[in-house]
Amino acid sequence: MRPALLAFSYALALAWVLPLPLRRLSELGASPRLALAAWLTAMVSALAYVMAALGLLAREAIAGWPAFARTVCESVSAGPCPAAVYRSAAYELGLAATAFFGGIVMVLLGWRYGRCLRRASVRTRAHAEAARITGHPVEGRDAAFVLDATSPAVYCVPGRPPIIVLTTGALAVLDSQQLTAVLAHERAHLAGRHHLLLAVTRSLAAVAPFVPLFARGTGDIARLAEMRADDVAARRAGRRMLLTALIAMGAGAATAPAPAAWLAATGGVIAIRVRRLAEPAPPGRRACHGLALAAITLAILGATALVPAFTVTGI
């Protein structure tokens, strides 16, 4: 019983305590790649320890039901538990019903998570197909399609093959160099497979919105993915070009944002991204934040690596 409680305690600490320092370290976007790694590692570790705790509980219950029933009774009563209580038919039936209910809840949560992922995939494929049918290709821009809409918008839609969608409003406000910078931003999203990160984390948040690690982490991961794509685009097309493109599109995007299911060049908090591009964090601050994020990630990875041994030995 104690190993399972330790595993649950660790998962709860990650889920409820870690989001605050992670958010503070990543809020300025000094190192989006390291911040993304820290958030995702924490989510994987928390889920791994929850599954390990459930496995330990199931193994203990199957291997020795009377001892398991006694341990649970003593844990609840915080003291000695008479055999007449934990060996009674009513108590054992209630404990078995609780275990069965817990298993059903886990199955339902897994089914709901899979359904969320499936729905997102279906919506993405449908939108990509509609864009190919109703839009027209941009000359000289591979896999880019234009839709008739007055509001400036540029976003990527993953698929096979992936496409980048632009509106006529975006073409009206962007010059050639700015358009190159925006397209570089979208290609960075596709190359980094940011859509998979968002699909997985948004589905987790939909299944367990009460868990801060998932609820807050999803928003931060979306913001950090935008910053990471900004960094790649700035290296390829120039920071100034990307900055002016975001400013040019900002007013229109504020009134007509791209759908949340896709990654847009004007997605996330535009003001934060513009400020970050215009006033990059000092090198010293970036280095300190990067070291702190790397240390957190390595510590969580080390703890996660212990899950197999923890599950086998129960220590």
Image (spheres, grey):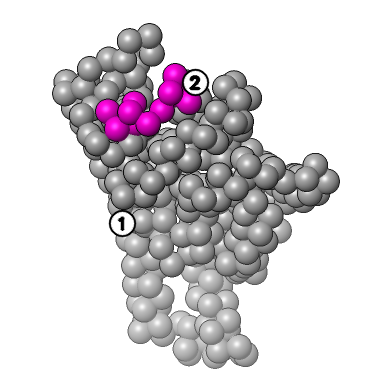
Q: Who is closer to the viewer here, 208 or 190? A: 190
| Residue, disc 2 | 177
The quarter holding residue 286 reads top right
Q: Residue at x 48, y 50 (%)?
A: 269
Q: Who is closer to the viewer here, 71 or 257? A: 257
Q: Does the magenta stretch include residue 33?
A: no
Q: Which residue is drawn at 56% across and 73% down?
A: 67
Name the residue furthest right: 284
Q: Is residue 169 magenta?
A: yes
Name the residue furthest top: 140
Say if residue 193 shows up in the picture.
Answer: no
Task: From this view, report whether residue 194 is shown above or below residue 142.
Answer: below
Examine the residues drawn in magenta and state their main secondary structure.
Answer: helix
Which residues make up the magenta segment? Answer: 168-179
| Residue 4 screen position, x and y as percent | 59, 64
Q: Residue at x 72, y 46 (%)?
A: 281
Left or right of residue 62, residue 20 in this image: right
Q: Who is closer to the viewer here, 107 or 169? A: 169
Task: From this view, report whether residue 18 is shown above or below residue 163.
Answer: below
Q: Residues within 10 Å of mark 2 (few under 14, many from 20)?
A: some
Task: From this view, report whether residue 289 is shown above or below residue 190.
Answer: below
Left or right of residue 75, residue 143 in this image: left
| Residue 159 screen position, x and y as percent | 33, 24
| Residue 137 screen position, x and y as percent | 27, 15
Instruction: Classify mark 1: helix, strand or loop.
Output: helix
